[in-house]
Image (cartoon, rainbow, N blue to C red):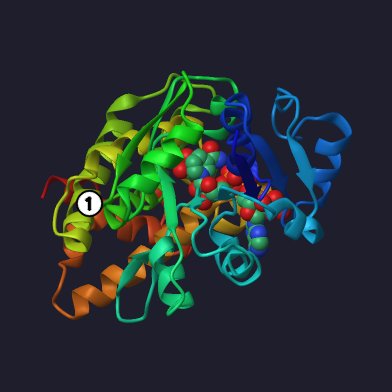
């Protein structure tokens, strides 16, 4: 039995309590300062408010003030925050984790600098805490939290610099329904799964656009969705090649995009925008829903524009990205999707 501490009781962090506890480990699920109600309800009912199924018996719940106790003797710490909590985790949690304790982060996204540089969250943490060196790893790949909870067959990728650590983490977490591929290509995996969060919105735009034309509840149209998927893969491949020198992780992006298109929150906002909602109207309708895709679209779009200015990328090769950003900025609509430019 090992000790696994999860910090961040959102959907994905909490979902990982299932394989961890079902493997017989001691699991301490610790809320952020924003998760008090989740922890209170979990203590009271043994169930996360957003899941249909109770946690496996024996999962322990901690408020953030009890972090020191929750981290005591941890063999592995899972970071369960979303993009909005990355700095918070770095400032409030990393200082309390020993250098040698492996950290596994579920957070999907990239950090963008003004010069167009994009880096993964593990690299952002590494740079920010230097000269301190920690054992930072991440999870990418198609996995929707509530389906993991339901034991749907799932394949993900754990990535990090050290294969031996990754083997250990896989040993702790793999089950007969949670299958774990390993990779030392951290930037490749992390870029792929962050980029798909952006582009899944494009496919959802097509879903909404069809509903705008034919009415909500109409027969779905797949030509337009597939056209968006095709264009997404093209643009992601170019970005991956620019960012990592190869497109080896395009399969991670495509797999992960599939699940987000069908099961993610990105679909909700993309569909509303596709139906013609303005961004403010859509955000109001989805108040309280985590919408990371908007953040990543903004960051990548800004980076691509800067890189294009510097002659490092051709902005014309990213018409879908540019259009999604324009929709989010209220400067374009789903009816103006530049389909013909996708043929170049
Ligand atoms: N949901 C899923 O199926 C999957 C999610 N992921 C990735 O995992 C990450 C987490 O997703 P998910 O669990 O769904 O997200 P949730 O929004 O459910 O939970 C995110 C966690 O981050 C916390 N958080 C949010 N903002 C801040 C902040 N400013 N400071 C500190 N903590 C904060 C949340 O607190 P609070 O609850 O109050 O918001 C919560 O603990 C994301 O990056 C996502 O892309 C990966 C695979 C699948
Ligand atoms: O799969 C997910 C993250 O990779 C979840 O996607 P959403 O943010 O669209 O819910």
Count of marks, rendered view: 1
Could you tell me which residue is drawn at 43 percent across and 80 percent down?
A: 131
Q: Quarter holding the N terminus? A: top right
Could you tell me which residue is drawn at 61 percent across and 72 percent down?
A: 91
In the foreground, 84 or 19: 19
43 with respect to 33 (left or right): right
In the foreground, 221 or 192: 192
In the foreground, 164 or 39: 164
Expressed as whole percent of the image width and height from the top left, the position of residue 55 reads 72, 28
Expressed as whole percent of the image width and height from the top left, the position of residue 94 reads 58, 66
Residue lying farthest to the right in this orientation: 44
In the foreground, 70 or 138: 70
Q: Secondary structure at mark 1?
A: helix
95 with respect to 264 (left or right): right
User: Would you say residue 276 is visible in this rendering?
Assistant: no
Task: Identify residue for label 1.
Answer: 235
Hey, which quadrant is residue 2 in on the image?
top right
Could you tell me which residue is drawn at 62 percent across and 29 percent down?
A: 18
């Amino acid at each position: 039995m090992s000790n696994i501490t999860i910090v961040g009781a959102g959907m994905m962090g909490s979902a990982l309590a299932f394989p961890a506890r079902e493997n017989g480990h001691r699991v301490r699920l610790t809320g952020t300062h924003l998760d008090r109600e989740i922890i209170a309800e979990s203590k009271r009912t043994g169930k996360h408010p957003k899941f249909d199924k109770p946690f496996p018996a024996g999962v322990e719940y901690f408020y953030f003030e009890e972090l020191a106790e929750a981290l005591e003797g941890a063999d592995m710490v899972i970071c369960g925050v979303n993009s909005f909590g990355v700095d918070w985790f770095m400032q409030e949690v990393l200082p309390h984790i020993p250098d040698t304790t492996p950290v596994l982060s579920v957070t999907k996204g990239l950090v963008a600098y003004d010069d167009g540089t994009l880096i993964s969250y593990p690299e952002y943490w590494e740079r920010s805490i230097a000269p301190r060196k920690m054992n930072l790893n991440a999870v990418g790949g198609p996995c929707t939290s509530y389906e993991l909870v339901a034991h749907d067959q799932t394949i993900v990728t754990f990535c990090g610099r050290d294969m031996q650590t990754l083997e250990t983490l896989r040993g702790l977490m793999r089950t007969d329904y949670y299958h774990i591929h390993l990779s030392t290509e951290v930037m490749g995996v992390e870029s792929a799964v962050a980029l798909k969060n952006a582009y899944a919105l494009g496919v959802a735009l097509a879903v909404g656009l069809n509903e705008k034309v034919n009415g909500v509840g109409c027969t779905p149209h797949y030509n337009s969705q597939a056209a968006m998927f095709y264009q997404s893969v093209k643009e992601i491949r170019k970005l991956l090649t620019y960012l990592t020198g190869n497109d080896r992780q395009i399969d991670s992006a495509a797999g992960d995009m599939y699940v987000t298109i069908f099961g993610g929150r990105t679909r909700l906002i993309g569909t509303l925008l596709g139906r013609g909602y303005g961004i403010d109207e859509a955000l109001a309708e989805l108040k309280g829903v985590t919408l990371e895709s908007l953040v990543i679209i903004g960051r990548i779009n800004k980076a691509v524009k800067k890189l294009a200015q510097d002659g490092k990328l051709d902005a014309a090769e990213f018409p879908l990205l540019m259009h999604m950003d324009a929709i989010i900025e209220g400067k374009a609509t789903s009816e103006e999707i530049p389909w013909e430019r996708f043929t170049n």
